[in-house]
Amino acid sequence: MPPKSTTEPPKSPPVPKPSHRDLNPVEQGGRSARDGFEYQDQIAVGKCLDMLIGGGPSEVWCEAEDDIVLVWSVDSDEQFEFVQIKKVNIGQAWTVAKLCSQEPAAAGKKKPSILERSLAHDRGAETCLFRIVSSWEPCSDLTPLKRQRDQRTDDDAREELQGVGSKLQEHAGKLTSPNGRGLDFWASATYWEVRATTEDVRNANHVKVERLLDTRGVWLAPDQKHELLDRLFRRVQDASLADGKSEKAAKRLKRSELLQWFLLQADAIVHPTHSGTSANLETKLTAASVDDTSIQVAKEQRRQYLAESRRPKYLTDDDRELLESEVVARLHRLKTQLDAGELPDNGRQFLSRCQQELLQLRTTLPCTSKPTEGAMYGCLYEVMNRCLHRLVRAS
């Protein structure tokens, strides 16, 4: 029997960490139910617009690894920021205890806390950052996380963040990431963003669209800007619904590709088929599975409406402008609900819903003379032909 060695065996070299790009999701939730996701998707739309305007991330991943992942290019390196979206009516400010609490799950088990799920993403080779976007403010113990990262370089800021890490450790214990980093690291790498309502986010996104179009020298009417933003919203929704393992590329929106798509969409909206034809209208009705006879009726009602607009017999110019303004507003509200998944309608059902909405509007319009039913429908079809309305969700 050989004598035992008195020297330590040589240690194996450390296994290099894989890139965050190559990791499969820690978990993947279903998105079949769309209710409640508009806030999250509008946040993602805003990050996409930041990316297109410039100075933002280089990629936006929708429900890949985390609710949103922002890829930042810093010199020749990449940083991955994992974003958790929390639009929950908790009735109070977010506390350290709430951040660290485990939630009940099936079979008596408990889900990992928000803090645990966030820290678990630190498992790749690149620099890892974290962000929480919530509709409620964090409590005073967590307020230092609201300080912008470029304002954390002084001693007071670092001391405050160390205090956050200590409070988290008091509640959660010594949590560590797969890369071996703890809660002091999490606190220093986390930014807390507060966006109160979905409407707030949507309004901010409209401002960003206007800014982006202005820098590109593209002019769109207000309703056309709404349509462009709706299409971007739907693009984000599609990315969120893609499979995180088999469709990684579909979930990852990149600046150059998305900017080209965005400008093509703007061009298609600003330069539709000549208004003298009903080609756009026919295409939209066909996409909604409307039968040929109904399509011909729609084209005729549009023709009659345009004839009335050119040589008014029943509507004054002021009445017609009021009618069109209100019709566009009602249709836009319905279209937004359709894109957000709040309406389960197919194309024909949605057309019927739009027609019923316009019939109700007809009774309340403060026009000099009451518009005919045909005028309301003709206006609907003219708006569709101008690419300001459609009957199926944006694609």
Image: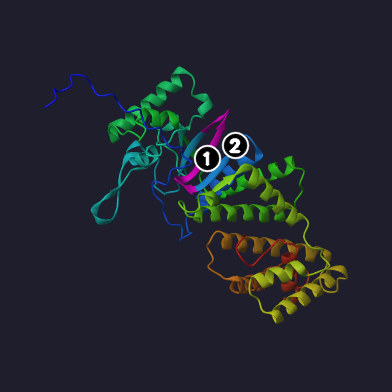
Residue 90 screen position, x and y as percent = 39, 47
Answer left or right for 21 relative to 100.
right
Q: Which mark is residue 70?
A: 1
Classed neighbour count for the residue bearing mark 1: other residues with Cα under 10 Å, few (<14), some (14–19), many (≥20): many
**Residue plotted at (46% across, 42% down):** 22
Q: Toward the viewer: 333 or 268?
A: 268
Q: Amino acid at mark 1?
A: Leu
Q: CA distance from mark 2 to mark 1?
A: 9 Å
Q: Quadrant of the C terminus?
A: bottom right
Residue 194 screen position, x and y as percent = 49, 40
**Residue plotted at (15% across, 23% down):** 4
Answer left or right for 373 relative to 276.
left
Which label's residue is closer to the chain start, 2 or 1? 2
Query: Is 69 one of the magenta-colored residues?
Result: yes
Classed neighbour count for the residue bearing mark 2: other residues with Cα under 10 Å, few (<14), some (14–19), many (≥20): some
Question: Is 231 rendered above or below residue 92?
Answer: below
Q: Which mark is residue 56?
A: 2
Q: Which residues are magenta?
A: 63-78
The chief SS type of the magenta part is strand
Query: Is 16 one of the magenta-colored residues?
Result: no
Location of residue 318 by image quarter: bottom right
Answer left or right for 309 relative to 25.
right
Residue 152 screen position, x and y as percent = 49, 24
Question: Is 339 rendered above or below residue 186?
Answer: below
Residue farthest along the front direction in this orientation: 1
> Helix or strand or loop: what does disc 2 sit on?
loop
**Residue plotted at (38% across, 37% down):** 119
Asked if the residues shown at circle 2 and circle 1 are in contact, with their CB atoms under 8 angstroms apart, the answer is yes
